[in-house]
Amino acid sequence: MPVLFGDSELRQAMARELSDGLSAAIGKPDQLAPLDRKRREADAAVQRAERAVTTELVEEELAAEARRYKALMAGHRAVAPKAFEASTDFAELHRLLTPRTGFLGGFRTNRALAKARRRVGAAEVSTEDLKAAVAAAEQTAAAVRIAAREGTTFAEIRPLLAGLDARPAGHRRVPQGVRGQPPATVRRGGRGTGDGAAVGPAARRRGLAEINSRHLVSALPLWVGTLADVEDILPPVPGMFDLVIIDEASHVDQPLAAPALLRGRSAVIGGDPRQLRHVSFVSDQAVQAAVEAEGTTALRDRLDVPKVSLFDAGAACSGVLWLDEHHRCAPHLIGFAATRFYDGKIALLTTHPSIADVDCIDVEHVPGERSAQGVNQAEIDAVLAHLRKRVAAGVRSIGVVTPFRAQADALEEALLNELTLDEITSGGVRVGTVHGVQGSEFDEVVISLAADERPGGWRFVNDRNLLAVLTTRARRLVHVITSAAEPPGLVGEYLAHAEVPPTETAGTEPDDPWTASLAEELRAAGLVVRTGYPVGQWRVDLVVGAKGEAVAVETRPHPHGAQAHLARWRALTHAGWRVHDAFGSRFDHDPARAAVELAQELAPELAAGLEQRR
C-alpha cells in the first residue's frame, strides 16, 4: 500500500487517509496474517512450477545426448548394466563419483569408486569409462520418462505460471515490521504526518520532528512522491528507510535530492545522462563558499552542483549498471536515438512482426513562420487538425510536444479553445515542452518543431539531450509538423531517418537440426517462418505467422539452461508474445508430423492474433 505524495491533491488525500491511521488491512493485524500466508503459498506455487519446468528441460537435454550417442549405448550398458535399471539413484552415483579432497582424499576417493562399481555392476574399468556409462544410463532414463509422458510440452504449466507471476501486489511480501503491529502504535506513527500536512511549513516541520519514524515506517513502509515535497512530508530522521530510489537522476540537482538521500540507509540512483540535464541556479561562488565552509574542498569537483547532476555524482562513486532493454518505442521510433545517442547498445523488447517493420514516423510540412513571440501559428493549426483525426480514430493517449515554451503555451490555449472537453479527455491529450514530458510516454506523439527557415532556433532544437527525449516519448506513432523545408543538423538527420521505411528484421539460421527441419516443413505447409528472431537480448527459436498473427515457438531448451529458458519466456510474455513449444520429443522427432500438428494447433492462435493486432 504505497503512500503517494507530490502535489496538493495527492497530499490532501494522503492526509485524509493518515488521519484515520491506516487502511483497514494495515490497521488490523489479524488481516495481515492471512495476507502473508497467501503470499507464501503463491511463492511456493511459483517455485513448484519452476521446478517442474526445470526438471523437464534437464531431461530434454539428457535425452538429446542419449540420441546423439545412441550407437555407444550398448557398450555403456555392458560396462555398468545395473546403472540402466529403473531404480537407479543417479544423485547417489554422482556423489560417489565425485573426487574427495583433504585428509586421505585419495583413499576416500578409491573407496567411493569401489562402492559405485558394486552399485552398477561394473568390473575394474577406468574411472572415465565408469562415469561415461553412468551418464549414458541417466540419459537413457530421461529419454524413457519423456517417452512415457508422450514428449515435453508446457501448454498446461505456462498459463499457470503466468497467472502466478501476475498475482496482485497484496499477495506478495508483507513487510516484517507491519506484521502484528498494534493498531494504536500504527495510528500513532501515521496521525502526526497527516496532521502536519494541513499546517504551514514551519509548524509542519516542527511537528514532523516529533514523529516516531520507526512507527511511521513500520505502518507505511512504501512512499512514492516527488523530491521537492520530502522535507514537508517526512520526519528529518537519517536512515529511516532501508532504501531510497531516485529516478530521472540526470535531471535532478544534488541539493534537491539531499533530503531524500538523508532519509535512506542505501540508495539506487537511476537516470540517463544522454537525456535532458538538470537546471541549477546555484552560482560557482556559492559552491566555493559552501565547500570551504564545510571543509570539503577535496570534493569540489563532485560537489559542483551547477554542472554535476545527482546521476553524475552517483556514477562517480559507485558502479554503474547499464539497462539496455527498451520496452517502449516501436523499432522505427527508437532506431534513430539508438544509433545516434546510444551507440547501438539498446536491445528492443518491442520487436514483433506486427510493428518491427512498420514506418511509424510521419512528417508534415506546413508553410509558416515563428513570430516575434516565439509562436508558429501554422503549426498550431496543423496540430489541431491532426488531433481531431486521431481522436476520432480512437487513439486514447496523445502527447503534443514542442521544444519551446511559448509554442507549448499557445498550443495549450488553442486546444482548450478549439477542442471539446470530450475530445481532450477521451484522447488523453497532454501538451508540454520537451523538458515537461521527460519521463512520460504516450501511444502517439505530435511534435511541433516551431522553428522555421531562420537558423537561430535550430541551435536549441539540435541539442542531443533534448532530441534524445523528444524522439522517444511515443510507443507507436510520431507525427512531426515543421515549417522548415530542410531543417539543419540532427533534426534534419532525424527527418531523413523518418523518410526511410524500416527493413525486415533479420533473424539467424538455426544451429540445431530439429529447429532447421521443422522450419523447413512449416514453410512447405505455407506458413511464414522466421528463425532466431531477435527480441531484446533473446533469440526466439521460431516465429510462425506474418505480421500481427505471429507467435513464438520454442523448439528446444535454451542453450544457457533452465533459468535462461524461464527468463526468455517471461520476457516474451511481458512483451505481449503468445508462446508455444514444439520439442521434438512431442512428435517422435518427426518434423513432417510436427509441422502438420503444429499448424493445426496454431491455426486459432494465428487468426486471433491477426484480429487482435489490427
Image (cartoon, grey):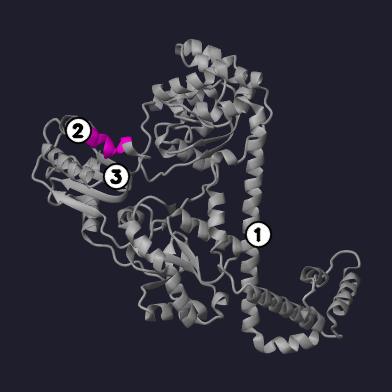
Q: Which of marks 1 and 3 is in front?
A: 1
What residue is drawn where x is 71% and y is 76%?
141
Quadrant placement of the N terminus: top right
Tell me the distance, in whole angstroms, between the alpha carbons under discs 3 and 2. Answer: 27 Å
- The percent position of residue 140, horizontal first and vertical second, equals 69, 79
Q: Which residue lies under the disc numbered 1? A: 51
Residue 430 visible: no
Q: Disc 3 residue type?
A: Leu
Q: Disc 2 residue type?
A: Thr
Residue 423 within the magenta-colored segment of the rendering: yes
Q: Which of 246 and 614 is in front in this view?
A: 614
Q: Which residue lies under the disc numbered 3? A: 470
Residue 413 visible: yes
CB contact under 8 Å: marks 3 and 2: no
Q: Disc 1 residue type?
A: Arg
Q: How crowded is mark 2: few (under 14 residues within 10 Å), some or many (20 or more)?
A: few
Q: The magenta stretch spans which residues?
A: 422-436
- The percent position of residue 596, horizontal first and vertical second, equals 44, 78
Q: Which of 531 and 184 is in front in this view?
A: 184
- The percent position of residue 230, horizontal first and vertical second, equals 49, 24
SS class, disc 1: helix
